[in-house]
Amino acid sequence: MPPVLELKTITKRFPGVLANDRIDLSLERGEIHALLGENGAGKTTLMNILYGLYQPDEGEIFINGRQVQIHSPTDAINAGIGMVHQHFMLIPVFTVTENVMLGSESLKMGGILDRRAATERIRQISSAYGLEVDPDDYVRDLPVGVQQRVEIIKLLYREADILILDEPTAVLTPQEADELFKIMHSLTERGKSIIFITHKLREVLDIADRITVIRRGKVVGSTTPKQANQSKLAAMMVGREVDLSVHKRAFTPGADVLTVQNLKVGDDRGQIAVDDVSFTVRAGEVLGIAGVQGNGQTELVEALTGLRPALDGSVRLLNEDVTRANPRRITELGTAHIPEDRQRDGLVLSFPVADNLVLNTYYQRPFSKGAVLQQATIAKVAEERVNSFDIRTPSVDTSAASLSGGNQQKVIVARELSRPVKLVVASQPTRGLDVGSIEYIHGRLIESRDNGGAVLLVSSELDEIMQLSDRIAVIYRGKIVDVLSAQDASKEKVGLLMAGVVRTATAKKASLGVKPKPKAKASSKTKTSAKKAAQKKKPSRAAKTTRRRKDS
Amino acid sequence: MSTLSPTMKSSAEYTGGGRRRVMGVVFLALAAAIWLLFARTTQGEMVTTFTLNPGGSQANFPNLEFITLPVLHAIAFVCALLGGYQLVRGFGTRTNAILGLVAALFIFAFLSWVASGTSLNLAGLLRATLIRAVPITLGALSGILCERAGVVNIAIEGMMLTGAMVAAIFGSLYGLWVGLLAGVLAGALLAVVHAIFSIKYKTDQIVSGTVINIFSIGMSSFISAKYLAANRQLNNPGIFPDIQIPGLAEIPFIGPILFSHNVFFFSMLLFLALLHFGLFFTRWGLRLRSVGEHPKAADTLGINVFKTRYMAVILGGMMAGFGGAYFTLGSVGRFDDVMTAGRGFIGLAAMIFGNWNPFGAFGAGLLFGFADMLAARLAILGVRVASEFLLMAPYIATMIVLAGVVGRGQAPAADGQPYEKEGH
């Protein structure tokens, strides 16, 4: 029997780039085939070709042994190919039914929508594959994980046999990702075949039947989870040995750099987001703040960097009270801030790289004399920083918008760490980045620590927290529920704390006055995750990965 | 009426506490205004007389007469009551309906005050309101067609003006129906220009629209001065006669107001119903809206974004051209310089006020048509309100809407954003 899908010598050139270079790929029936590669390796380009969004310059596509031409998404849909894009293609103000039927509407009397028939089919699909969703809900009211289910239903509604999932876990919490993997298995059990695009090694080993690694537009190898391990895959992806472990000097904390006491911060809707939080970060240590996204981390970081007013409590930086200081004062006292949303808060995307590299110091000598910017100096310093921080950009005059995510982040890191800093506040510093960039940025953060800086690392990636931190504070619904030292912290323990399930003796004291039952809709996600953790799903999974990490 | 449309229904669910209080204060303020502005200046024994037969109507319907002051007090009391309830408990999803009721009560109080000691032809006012609402609503429908597909069209004013002139010339030469058709095609032609600029060349849509507006004013004034002034026979198309709907037109009071109009009024009602049904209940509408909300998503599902947008903008231009023809063939009977007088812009305001929904826009069109009508009439009645203030009313109302007081407007998400296809 021929494979469900076969790609032969697919080549795609963009101006100045060979995005896909004679790529061969085959997909068997009922298989989950992972396509692994760094950002910009050409995975998404290849899938866009398969889905008819791009036209290949060379190459052939076979479906069930028959050659097909795919010129548009309509051709792809007709050939039984469906794609869940990395950024969801859903219309928030439409209902689930409307989103699913759009483009292949159920009709009556010529052109009139038959919503009832469509809803009925959606219900059938959702019960057949365990994709729980209410067809009458508006998409904008759904959590991200459910939106993804809607995307999958969209494909099944069009009777797709080949499902392409482009970085499906990038936006999901660990619990939602587990849910997705279950759904993927139930799909393959029913004869669907899945191409799973990712750059996360752990997921590939967990779920894939076969793995194909792409680097710089070329297939560099194929393997199976049994034959591979994380470091082997990472080496294939990056093209050199990658050190996944972090080397740091022995932990010798110094004086308190940042002291936060009883801090209270509100969110945009006026709710309390950070509730009576106290902690310190000392010189030469990394304090990791672990927590599921949306538990007050964003507001906490904004309050510490002067971007959001504190409602109560105090923040002291090197013996100066900065609770009400403006961002410039906090920066001048020696704080580096790597913000959560690098494109919105970290860069001026339309500015050239050079200007972005001096955004925090442009008004000081030597970059300014009086009111006049010293463009020559700025360009010279920018060149130096581009070299020393390995920023891949055609020139320092290129706008920041045209850089890859990893290089954009390096621009921010270069700007923030190129001057003597006492405190680094890094919020989700490696989100969405490739292995090479992650390795680099982790190295720089540890370098700051080893040189006697204090590092506050906020991340929802538990692996990252565990690797880098000397102490780990867990935040849950705006409160620090516990602070553990790196030795005491296991993944299970931190995971349960993140889900709000267990508290140690010290935490009980800290969390007096927690409202017992969540009322708001927003907390339902954390509620379910708590339930899941209680069912011991999380620990077993975590244990599995720790084993793998030891293997590597 | 618009509970059937999905966007409207869900926007009501997002009624926050702040808005609840603001609306309560608005209701109370209107009640206070009735007391302070109207009731205080009304003598106790004065009588309001409303004539309920429009001019020229044969039907004989008795006048509505009442002593002004108690009615004003009663209306103010009801408004205050509703405001109080809104402040304390809130009407929730019915807030907008209550707002409409309060506004209607306020207008009735205002008219009672105006007519106290004299008489006012209420039926005539209502009929005139409906007629004034026709071009505004047609302009709004044109805007809805374009913007629901993601193309901002501020050129409606210019399209209307050109449509009006072309309709007058062709109507004079070849008869009313040819004139109407020519007006519609003139609107379509300008829409093609706007579409090519904004869809193909991705020009800023505001710039493209402004250019068309300026071009239309200049071109129509030039042709009017150069040719129409010299050749009167080119600018004398006459107007469409009123159609009496058999049976219905004889109903007292309602009949002459609703069922005795020219072809423009009845077409507007038809377009209104068709567009509402088309947008929310057909494949055509689902695809059109998807292109205005998230063109890339539509593209990945095999919908041709460019074709859909061209279609929508050209239909919108035809609608504007039709609305323009109303001025010459449905109202005045000749073309005058800049005769649309901002009705296209008020149409856009009605579109926003009506939350990009046809029936909502019609409701706003009625409100603006009423202000428009009052501005013309009150001067004649010798009322001490400057007509300029009434003409400002639509714009002020729109600004209040845009500020989010009456409810969060929901523009299509990709409104005004050119679509760029990748990888080709």
Image (cartoon, coloured by chain):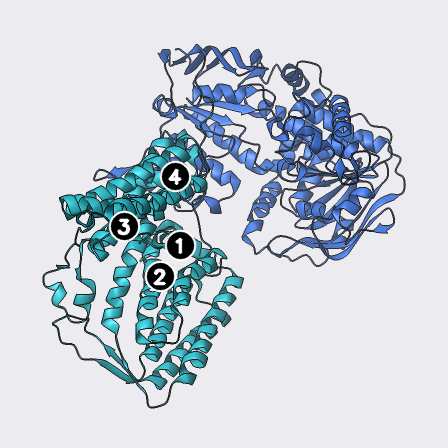
Chain colours: A blue, B cyan
Which quarter of the image is occupied by the N terminus of chain A? top left
**Residue B418 visible here:** yes
Residue depicted at 29% across the width and 48% down the height: B225
Please give the residue where the numbered disc 3 appears in the rendered image.
B323
Labels 1 and 2 in the same subunit: yes
Establish if A91 lies above or below B61. above
**Sequence-first tag of 1 and 2:** 1
Q: Which image quarter: residue A419?
A: top right
Mark 1 vs mark 4, foreground winner is 1
Chain of the residue on which disc 1 is drawn = B
**Sequence-first tag of 2 and 3:** 3
Is the C-beta separation of discs 1 and 2 under 8 Å?
yes
Query: Outermost residue, bottom direction?
Result: B45
Establish if B98 lies above or below A431. below
Is the C-beta separation of discs 4 and 3 under 8 Å?
no
Please give the residue where the numbered disc 1 appears in the rendered image.
B349
Chain of the residue on which disc 3 is drawn = B
Please give the residue where the numbered disc 2 appears in the rendered image.
B368
Q: CA distance from mark 2 to mark 4?
A: 30 Å
SS category of the residue bearing label 4: helix
Residue depicted at 26% across the width and 67% down the height: B126
In front of the other: B249 or A263: B249
**Sequence-first tag of 2 and 4:** 4
Establish if A30 lies above or below B344. above
- Label 3 packing within 10 angstroms: few (<14), some (14-19), many (20+): many
Query: Which mark, by number, is residue B290?
Result: 4
In front of the other: B162 or B303: B162
